[in-house]
Amino acid sequence: MKPFVVAAAVVLLALGALGCSQKEAAPQTVKLTVSDKGFVPAEITVKKGVPVTLLVTREVEATCATELVIEGQGIHKPLPLGQEVVITFTPDKKGEIRYSCPMDMLSGSIRVQ
Ligand SMILES: [Cu+2]
């Protein structure tokens, strides 16, 4: 490799590292369970513009929350018993995002700040 190319690569790498630290792109990971009380915790808080990973485990056989629906995010995921399901999305505005079972009997909220 020519020295100029190496120097350019180093500069690009440095810029990339700077960009990352400024954005503070620490992923937000939240564990949710479906218990006999419904979704636990029923309310979570996340940051706007940062990818959110929900790790959802259904722990009870008898519940209507066998799927999870997140309003406005196009998310509708089956929750097999005892399996951790990974759901990711990036909230793009502040406010409240509701999530629920498909029949909207059990629900929770995601507060975006
Ligand atoms: Cu339901």
Image: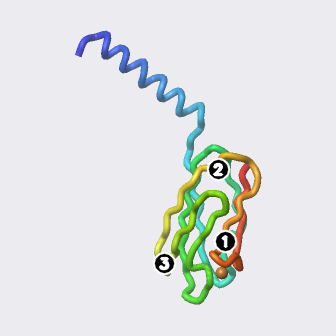
The image quadrant in which ligand 1 is located: bottom right
Tell me the number on the disc at residue 70. none
**2 or 3: tag closer to the N-terminus:** 3
As drawn, the label of residue 80 is 3
In the image, what residue type sits under mark 3?
Pro
Q: Earlier in the sequence, mark 1 or mark 2?
A: 2
- Residue displayed at 71% across by 69% down: 108
Q: How many marks?
A: 3
Spatial separation of the CA atoms under disc 3 and disc 1: 16 Å
Neighbour tally class for label 3: few under 14, some 14-19, many 20 plus, Cα within 10 Å: some
Q: Residue 71: where, in percent of width, then height?
A: 67, 62
**Cβ of mark 1 under 8 A from ligand 1:** yes
Q: Which mark is residue 91?
A: 2
List x then y, in percent, for residue 96. 75, 57
Q: Tag 2: residue type?
A: Pro
Left/right of residue 82 with respect to residue 103 in the rendered view: left
